Amino acid sequence: MQNWWDYATDTLRGLEQQHADRTRYMARQALDLISPSNFPVTNNEILAATAREGGRNLIEVAVHLAQDFIQTATERRGPPPKGCRPSKELACKPGKVVFHNYLFELIQYAPSTDQVQAEPILIVPAWIMKYYIPDLSPQNSMVMYSVDRGFAVFMISWTNPSAEQAGLWLENYRKRGGMAALNAIAAIQPDRLVHALGYCLGGTILATAAATMARDGDERLASITLMAAQVDFVEAGERLLFLDESQVASIEDMM
Amino acid sequence: MARTFAAIRAEDLIYSGAVRRYYLGEADLPTDIGVRNADSTRMPARTLSEYLRGLFLENRLTAGRFAVEGRVIALKDIDAPMFVVATENDHIAPWKSVCKVQLFADNDLTFALVKGGHNGGIVSEPGHAGRHYRLSHRAAGGHQFRPAPELISDLAQLMYEGALPVIPIYVDSPVATKATDVFAQHASELENGATLMHDLRSRQLHFTETREQSMALDQVQGFHIVIAASGMCDAGRIRHRLKNRIWMDQATVLFTGFQAEGTLGRSLQNGARTIRIQGEEFQVRARIRSLDLYSGHADATELVQWIKDRLPLIHDLFLVHGEAAAIDALAARLAGIVDPSHVQRPVLDESFALTAQGLRRLSIPHRPGWHRKRSRGWIGTTTCRTCSSASTSPWVPRRTNGPATFCSAACAWRWPGKMKSHGVVRIACAIAANACPRAAAESRPHLGGSSTPEARAGDCAGGLVRKNHAFASSVAAM
């Protein structure tokens, strides 16, 4: 079905590529929405569960619906579920804040080995999500892995900007963020090369910082790691489909 | 912003979860990634507009229009080595886009393509069950790499990007045409299926189905690409295309698959200056190139792993594909994993009945003489019809219509079944036995019966005498 629609929305002569992509995307969204598994009478699993529980699952459903409606309307989130609480089960590697400014806090993780490697690691996460993805759970924490191998690990934890900080721009994130963190590390561990790691948007800002440092003859970076980070946006995926001048202008006006 | 991203993979990220929560009444199972994804932060307005306009719309960073402190920066200036990680199903930063950093920097660069999405792929450690990764490395100043799965898809992409001129591609193979149809039917089950389908429907792509369409390709003028399926150039439409182009300076033959020893494809790869196709001789003037990125075959390690994943083995394992040396090597690798007596290496024309009790060997069917003659040269290891021992240099009687694999002339003679020219076989057998009875007997202890080599040779000749006195005397004279 989806292939048929892909075909129907794609092979028209004279159709502009972007328009074809948009049509295909909308067709797929519509198909996803009306997929038989989304409706109670056409989804066997739902029918079976309702019959088995005598309709009790439908009461649960009403509770969930009410909870989610209130949460979305008030933009307030409930406490994280047990087993996944940040700083308890998640992001639990102990560390302390060694530097902070209006843009971020720099966390240094406590070493777990007697000897520490000469070159520290700086992690630059994206600032649209919380910082702790490289230190998620103990079994998949990159921070813990590196610390256990004797690296001094520093992590940027971006501030959640308030309405007064709406004027912050990318250059702030580079200079007052990435570069300030490097300077802070240099103050704690002088004359060391630093391995820098950027995730997503953090990788993009790290790439700009590295290029600026290279231009200015600053050779403090030992290596650069980019994780799921783009520097070129020509093929940036389906986000680009609806992004054009008019869209950006309307977003800017809303803000 | 998080919601924008979720909408791109709506089926996975929104609806399936919603069905569970709103119809089945199940509470969401808390996962570490889920909690972290809900824990979003805000983005300053000016940064967002700069990000959308400057980076996304105008692509300033790689276009050389991204200024820091009033001066443009270039990723090319970076000397520090880079490690770039991308994930296969990333809907936020697609891997093909992430991979492009190599086009804008000249440093030492290692690229890792890992399984999973934007978060999951990054979070799982190497060696995590059910996950995999691929690595490629480029030294500072080295050439670009392009890790990519499919030839047609890549060509279409390269044209789309402007790296190749937009030229017609002809797929000249009924099998490839059918395979493409199968791809199309199941594209939704493939990773990157949508991209693949998009590329397969490129307007530059043509499929030739009938013989006439295929022959018309020889009339095509100008720069074009023909993708022809080739039985390593020994069969299929490729032979006709080669006949027409191999003697041209402007043509290039690009091999994307393995060419076995003894095939036309291998001779071309080895730099043959003249070749014969269907009895005609041709000068090779075209450029011959090979590319082994696109092989669909697993290597020995992957095959062994595949077999290990399916243990315990109830009956037998058949090794049927590859050159004799490669099959032997694979069998040796499997020695510790599968009982060697259960590893079967069938020869040409051998047939088996697979039953619940195990396999049963059937008699080898009669095939026309040319087929067997052709097979004479390159049968790998065969099992003797008489004594069931394995032999790498089988003795194949000429001018017979019966089964054709014996370890030695002696065994051929002892074969109780009927052969059209049994008499001739017996002479040959006697000659072989007389010529070097000791070597023949010692290297084949399975003959049984008589205890000494001389006795065995005598056995052989004796049988002959019983059969034909005249032949016996002539053999004795030899």
Image (tube, rainbow, N blue to C red):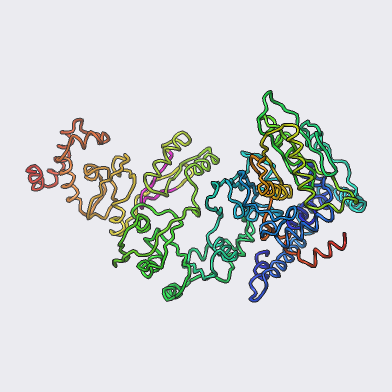
Where is residue B36 shown, x and y percent of the image? Answer: 79, 43
Q: Is residue A62 visible?
A: no
Among the 4 quarters of the image, the one containing residue B218: bottom left
Report the side of B263 relative to B475 (left or right): right
**Residue A136 belongs to the span the image colors magenta:** no
Front-lying residue, B358 or B167: B167
Which of B470 and B431 lies nearest the eye of the viewer?
A: B431
x and y percentages locating residue B139 in the rendered image: 54, 46
Please tell me how many numbered marks the rendered image carries. 0
Give, as a single range, the part of the protein colored magenta. Answer: B342-353
Q: Is residue B139 left or right of residue B276?
A: right
Q: Is residue B345 magenta?
A: yes
Q: Can residue B70 be seen?
A: yes
Kindly indicate the quadrant of the structure image that contains residue A238: bottom right
Quadrant where the C terminus of chain A is found in the figure: bottom right
- Please state if A106 lies on the left or on the right of B121 as rendered: right
Q: In this picture, is B341 found above or below A39?
A: above
Q: Residue at x 37, y 50 (%)?
A: B350
Q: Residue at x 58, y 50 (%)?
A: B106
Q: Position of residue B437 (x, y in %)?
A: 17, 37
Locate the N terminus of chain A by quadrant.
bottom right
Percent coordinates x, y for residue B174 in the rendering: 47, 67
